[in-house]
Image (tube, grey):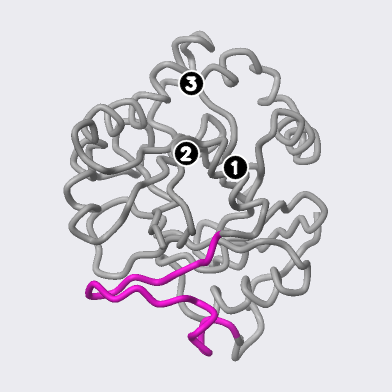
Amino acid sequence: MYLYETHLHTLEGSACGEVAAADYIDYMIVKGFTGIVVTDHFFNGNCAVDPHLPWKEKVELYCDGWRKAHAAAQGHEFDVIFGIEFNFNGDEYLIYGIDGEWLLDNEDIMGLDRRGVHKKINEAGGIMVQAHPFRERKYLKDIRLTPDICDAVEVYNASNDDNMNALAYEYAKKLGVPMIGGSDIHYPRDVLGGILLPDRIKDTHELAAAIRAGQAVPAKIERGIVTRIDEVQDLMVSVKEPTAPVYYM
């Protein structure tokens, strides 16, 4: 099977990113990945793009991380896929199946609520995946879940602890939706996440279709060993409830 990183931040697009997009290519190849999905924080999150610029210029700059990673991958058997991390009120979503051209034509997404954005993404053939749904951090005051707009759930996030991930796994099982894993990588780290796919994918549209079809197998990558999440009890069964209040939006 083919291993893809689905949740990656570059310093070009994310204010919290610490690695230049081009520098990820050799690193992720060594880690055993077939490709990466660049999911920089969008304009309503921790984005590196000046919010006061005109829409077209903002979109062009936002796509710079993906563009530079894609250029650096030329000559390698390595796929670089476009994605987005979209924020509402602490609840964040990985969006696949749309590209920079679509963003240029859809400035109105910034004024839509969760369901409005979800409808528009679905109409374009894309999907919204709730990222790290049970994450608890000092900057997050609560947990916000949106079961009716989850096309899939990120059940393994390498930046979360095991119980947060297990809660997400149980939540996805309850909803009966596809699952993904990702690293949420901002800098080099020892433990990574991703998905295993039966076939290689060439773009964000094929990624969305593969996840929607339930072909993605979430995985953990540590010391060169790839382990399916559904083979790790601690990542499937929670041992405690969330400490933050949980709201269904």
Q: Is residue 36 above or below residue 195?
A: above
Q: Earlier in the sequence, mark 1 or mark 2?
A: 2
Quadrant, the N terminus: bottom left
At a point 54% along the width and 17% down the height, the residue shown is: 101
| 169 to the left or right of 224 | right
Q: Is residue 186 above or below residue 102?
A: below
Between 128 and 139, the one nearer to me in the picture: 128
Pointer 2: what residue? 41
- Type of the residue with mark 1: Asn
Contact, CB < 8 Å: mark 2 with mark 3? no
- Type of the residue with mark 2: His
Q: Earlier in the sequence, mark 3 or mark 1?
A: 3
Pointer 3: what residue? 51
- Type of the residue with mark 3: Pro
Pointer 1: what residue? 87
Q: Secondary structure at mark 3?
A: loop
Residue 170 is a magenta residue: no
